[in-house]
Amino acid sequence: PDHVGSYVFRTVLSVNKRPIRRRTVRPCTALPSGRRFECRFCPKTFMYKHHLMDHIRTHTGERPFKCHLCAMSFARKFTLVEHTRRHTGERPHKCDFCPLRFGSRSSLTQHMKRCRNG
């Protein structure tokens, strides 16, 4: 791995065989030896085991969090929580620039970029 600033980078080959640098952990000083959790499918590393377990599901396709209102299932509990808001209509995320509210933080962030500049 290469060290640049406080980040650790690994050079990996992309699908088209071009070398790319991927930031794998942040910051490297926060990871004493023996505390790194490495993915067995790719070069990513994680500081916490539960982050690794969430990540491994992207490789295995496991989706243990199931919506009790429809047939959808999710790899992360957080995604299920945001999905459930579609059924309940809950919109806890409010725009700072207008009265609109959103069920997911990512939808709010996208909206606020447009709302602030528009």
Image (cartoon, grey):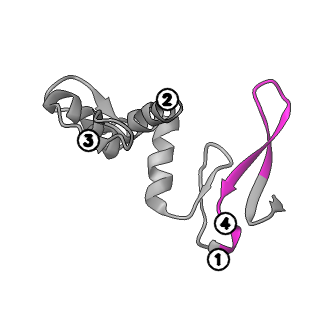
**Residue 53: within the magenta?**
no
For the residue marked with disc 1, what is the amino acid?
A: Pro
Q: Badge 3 local density, few (<14 within 10 Å), some, or many (20+)? A: some
Q: Amino acid at mark 3?
A: Val
Of marks 4 and 1, which one's residue comes earlier in the chain?
4
Which badge, 1 or 2, is on the more N-terminal residue? Answer: 1
Distance between mark 1 and mark 2 Cα atoms: 41 Å
Q: Which label lies toward us, 4 or 1?
A: 4
Residue 34, image x, y percentages: 62, 73
Residue interval drawn in magenta: 10-29
Q: Earlier in the sequence, mark 3 or mark 4?
A: 4
Residue type indicated by callout 2: Arg
Say which residue label 1 marks: 32
Q: CA distance from mark 3 to mark 1?
A: 33 Å
Q: Secondary structure at mark 2?
A: helix
Please state which of residues 101 and 87 is positioned toward the viewer in this rendering.
101
* In this rendering, position of residue 11 left or right of residue 22: right
At horizontal 29% and vertical 33% (from top left) the residue drawn is 100
Q: Residue at x 47, y 55 (%)?
A: 51
Residue 114's mark? 2
Quarter of the image with the N terminus in it: bottom right
Q: Kindly give the residue lying farthest to the bottom in the view shown.
A: 32
Q: Report the residue marked by disc 3.
A: 81
- Spot occupied by residue 53 in the image (x, y as percentages of width and height): 45, 51
The answer to whether the residue labelled 1 contacts the one labelled 2, judged by CB atoms less than 8 Å apart, is no
Q: What residue sits right under mark 4 in the picture?
A: 27
Classify mark 1: helix, strand or loop.
loop
Q: CA distance from mark 3 to mark 4?
A: 29 Å
CA gap between label 4 and label 1 equals: 11 Å
First in residue order: circle 2 vs circle 3 = 3
